[in-house]
Amino acid sequence: MIEPIALEVSTGDIEQLATGMNLMWALTVTFLIFFMHAGFAMLEAGQVRSKNVANQLTKNMLTWAVGIFVFFVIGMGISNNVGAALGGGDAGPLTMFGEGSFDWAMWLFSAVFAMTAATIVSGAVAGRAKLRAYVTYTFLLAAVIYPVVAAMVWYAPGGEPILASFGFSDFAGGMVVHGVGGVAGLTAAWILGARMDKYNEDGSVNIIPGHSMTFAVLGTLILCFGWFGFNVGTAATVVDVDAGAAAGEVVGLADFEYVGSVAMVTALGMGLGAIGASSVSLAINGKVDTLYVANGMLAGLVGVTGPTDLITPMGAIAIGFLAGAQLPIVFKLVDERLNIDDVCAVFPVHGSAGMLGLIVYPLWSIEGTAIGGGVVAGGILSIEASAFAPQIVGVAVITVWTVVATAAVWGAFKAIGQARVTPEHERDGLDVAEHGVDTYPEFGKPDIAADGGHALDDGVRTDGGEPTDARRSSSELCSDGGRPNDGEIKMVTAIVRPDRLGAVKQSLAEAGAPSLTVTNVSGRGSQPAKKGQWRGEEYTVDLHQKVKIECVVADIPAEAVVDAICEGANTGEPGDGKVFVTPVERAVQIRTGKTGTDAV
């Protein structure tokens, strides 16, 4: 039997262990928040056109790359020193170079919040902002704009942040992070102007759909996952040495006393945001728009992020629902009334939702007077009237600062002609113009599929057609004894439905057509236009996806090929397509140099 051994542990050892636990928790949630950048990248990439995807992904990566450097070198220092100056604290170093392990961990935790605010802006200016202008703005946001806001609410070493001393509260960044990002995005989009062809001369809106709903929803769910780190992680102290000493113990339980409440509020806000946006979408459009559901989840999360430690369960339900419900309404206001081209709806998702949550939270404050407590624990309402004024003032101050600072930066870019790309570059797409890459090199390009096959030794064709004896003369293939196509080479071109391609290939193989080329195309004709929907708004799809089949024949009658295509492509409905027969002046086989009918 192993004898138990008593270990002597000093108070200092326990304090070190407590510090290690706190650091481990803080860094874990920091990494979780960092993963939200993958969510932002997917969400924004899905909402832009295919020609701008690489540009959007690049902006998201550079946001982190530039922002994290700037926030280390000067951003955190400015935040601490501005906070101390405004809140009566102590001045400190401007950089993080001389700090220690614990301070560096806390800096990184602060930095991921700053980078979240910065990356939100990229979604608003997508499709037309110059990369250098956006990167420069990210530099200034991480160095000055965000640090000043954080200083007024969170950071004032040795003192109390000025807005916090007034009574303003923002637990996890509903306004400090998301409000700043949403307001900055709206301001930048306003200064920059709309994308080409977004608005008509009379102010009416042309819908420009994003290229991938799948990416947008995937990004949303990644963000929702990371958000638990964002909110719950803000309770970033597991144990508190000072609290333990005050209670006559070595250590005491710290913020984890309310971590369950924060997690509950976060989850409810997410769900009710989706329900709120779905309900309004259904009421306005008669349909539940998928993108509104996704954006609504995020708006609900933003709505409860600011007061997540201060509201009752009923407050989480109400604020989450209201934040989601306002999203379609505010988006339509921005898009159709103000004519501001907010591509990824960053203001209704992050700006107005963050404002709403912080302003109305006193209706459901855990410190308020409960109304209906006998019906629902915590009350249907729980009003803390004294909290309204500080919240309104805090939101207003942060909004004014963000608008002024952002307008100054983007206004300067615009004044010197460096804010947006040229019309030619915008028309071509920023992937090529700004980066020289094509995100989808085969998308919309000729997809060649040669199905003619070749003759094997046993005469079996790989395309399913009947074997043809190479020794048969061309005249044997024509019922009137003449040469097929009067000895000429013919090009048979058909535009057919994509879903009929297999049947057409089979028909051509049975007719003995030697080869064919298939290209993805789009066009319009007798087939009726279809209606699509993007963020609740309908648009017309009058260019239908088709395939173009080209078949060059010499020894096989062109009419036989035409008949085969018609047999395979015919459905009896408008939009089946057309077939064209044209003469080929000359043909050359590249490998052998054969010409004329021998080449075919």
Image: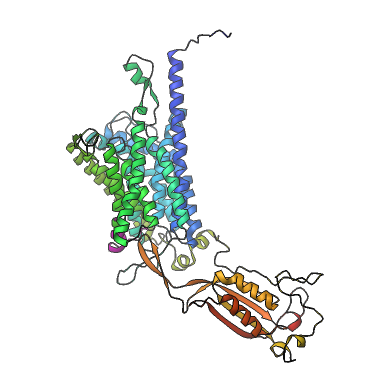
User: Magenta region: which residues?
Assistant: 330-344
Residue 130 placement (x, y as % from top left):
44, 58
Residue 297, image x, y percentages: 37, 48
Q: What residue is drawn where x is 23% and y is 41%?
A: 391
Q: Is residue 160 above or below residue 211?
A: above
Compared across the picture, whether 215 is left or right of 325 comes to right
Q: Quadrant of the C terminus?
A: bottom right
In the rendered view, would you say 128 is above or below 42?
below
Quarter of the figure with residue 189: bottom left
Q: Is residue 531 left or right of residue 434?
A: left
Colour scheme: rainbow
Front-most of 329 and 379?
Answer: 379
Determine whether 440 is above or below 397 in the image.
Answer: below
**Which of 471/299 is in front?**
471
Q: Is any part of residue 66 visible from this angle?
A: no
Q: 294 or 160: which is nearer to us?
A: 294
Asked if one can make out residue 598 in the rendered structure from this viewpoint, the answer is yes
Q: How many marks?
A: 0
Whole-percent x and y of residue 221? 44, 47
Q: Quadrant of the N terminus?
A: top right
Q: Residue 98's x, y, as percent?
A: 46, 30
Q: Is residue 41 magenta?
A: no
